[in-house]
Image: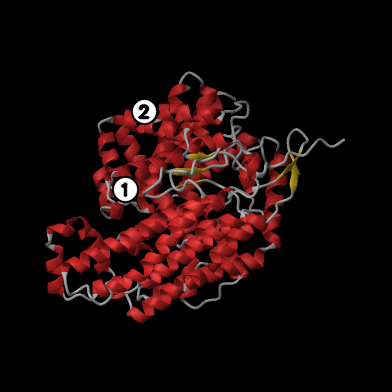
Amino acid sequence: MQKNAKQIPARNEIPAEHTWDLTPLFVSDSNWEEVYSNTEQLIPRYKNYEGKLADFFDVFLQAIEFDLSIARDIDRLYTYAHLKSDEDTTNQNAQAMLQKAHSLAQRAAEASSFLVPEIQSLPEAVISNYLTNTNISQYVFYIEKILRYREHTLSKEIEEILAMAHEVVIAPMEFFRKLDNADMRFGTITDEQGNTVELSHGNFITFLMSYNRDVRKNAFHTYYKAYDNHKYSIAQSLASSVKKDVFFSRVRKFKSCLHQALFPDNIPDTVYHTLIETVSSNLQPLFKYLSYRKEALGLTELHFYDTYVPLVADVPFSMEYEEACDVCAQALHILGEEYISTLHTGLLGGWVDRYENRGKVSGAYSSGCYDSPPYILLNYDANTINSLYTLIHEAGHSMHSYYSRKNQPYVYHEYTIFVAEVASTLNEILLSHYLLQQYSDNPRMQAYILNREIDEIRGTLFRQTMFAEFELLVHTMAENNKPLTFQTMTDTYTNLLHKYFGNTIVIDTDLFLEYLRIPHFYSAFYVYKYATGIAAALSLAKQIINNPNASHRYLKFLSLGGSAFPLEELRIAGVDMESPEPVIDALQYFDSLVDRFIDVHKKIH
């Protein structure tokens, strides 16, 4: 007789104490509607400033502060709506609020579309005079960043048209999100205990970590069958997103899509190219690890679904959420009492939406706005160490947000993604360091943690660089007017799989479709920041571990928000990402971990 199938709970079945508390944002949906209405009524006031920025300094300053106040209100409205929507994508009221927030943002963008071109067109004598006024001192960097875009900003009329196209522009991403999170079903598989379990984004990796090869193999092929069933539709949405990037790079007179993506952070193209060249020419440590993995698992062939299972088979892991919060605080104690006490209180308070429910967005993220606590969406699973690492990863983002909002005005509170991945990844590295210390007299657990750290770096440094190279290749194809079809993109991805895995694994045809399921590809040239982030984080973690005083520089870095360009912020923290050295050091560190792991692992077998 078949055992009862495990069901993913509905949202209303999740205890309130396990969900985030959104009342600091709005006490109710009706409160949201009230603020929405008030903000909506303010938008026509933009016309009070149009065409007048060159007339008086006070008008110029008022226009900037009015625009920032509208943006702040919209941030608050959008944050609440997107969190409510993501906790249950079937919640139609939340979906409606999110659409209204998007619409409000679009209308504000249309109404304010004159602002940037008008600032950029101010006579040099006028803007220079304005910038010397002490009353505008806190906005100088903000204004200078606007002025950088002079050659990439179009006429007022064209900017208005581009702003009006916002909802059309995001259509490929929204299509993918709805299909991937709401409509797609992945079927069921049989777990190790013989239970029929619904396969989902949330438990897919858990099944790939199963020691039962039939379970992980079945999970892999069952999961990708859903993407195979929708491959042409998803490929079309991705191609449309890439073509959208090409359109905007050409319209705004950038050299390329890559140049456009890196311009806001003032990152030279060489940083991106150097990352790909450095990693892809130093794959031997990865090949060495994968070859040993095949040997350790006793396999004649290594498949992708064999690359997640821990190689130390008899170290079970189970950690309830509350204990995981304690471990995070202990692992991060080197960052100081304020850091860990604030974090621990938030993780056990209302910051985190902890567990999976039906309709909830997959994966994990940190969110929030200037007028809210940091919020973390999780799909926590007590039976996988991945969830502990995900928790401390998102905690890094959230504490970065906490320090930025505490120390910066609204105009500079938002840090870039480039530096965000440093904060989250450093937390993971400190967790690995802590766990290795805790189990210093237990070679089996040492091997387990080393295995986990190797796999994390492998997934972040090598895998994300492969993704980054895929993005570069498909955008270059589109820029050169080559067709972006399901077949051309699949062929491109297949070639990269062979390049980055060499002859170490048998590449199943299902894996050729992996690129179809990566949501980050709808935010062009995003994923490389994970790889550069881990390189910077490894450098900073080494400094902090060896010299606790280095944590003061790091906390200063967390407090900078967006008050400087990211490369300069990282130099303040203590690492120079314009040099290839951090990437080279990360690759050498990975190589040393592999050697250390192989040595320990062989001794316990």
Name the residue furthest right: 1
User: Relative to the observer, which residue lies in front, 351 or 324?
Assistant: 351
Q: Secondary structure at mark 2?
A: helix
Name the residue furthest top: 441
Dot label at residue 497: none
Q: Is residue 435 above or below residue 139?
A: above
Q: Position of residue 423 (x, y in %)?
A: 37, 43
Left/right placement of residue 279 relative to residue 151 reads right
Residue position for label 2: 333
Amino acid type, residue under disc 1 in the picture? Glu
Q: Quadrant of residue 578?
A: bottom left
Dot label at residue 581: 1
User: Relative to the observer, which residue lies in front, 169 or 499?
Assistant: 169
CB atoms of marks 1 and 2 within 8 Å: no
Kindly identify the residue that appears in the image at 59 percent across and 30 percent down. 312
Specify whether residue 187 is in view: yes
User: Relative to the observer, which residue lies in front, 449 or 41?
Assistant: 41
Q: CA distance from mark 1 to mark 2?
A: 28 Å
Left/right placement of residue 4 relative to residue 364 reads right
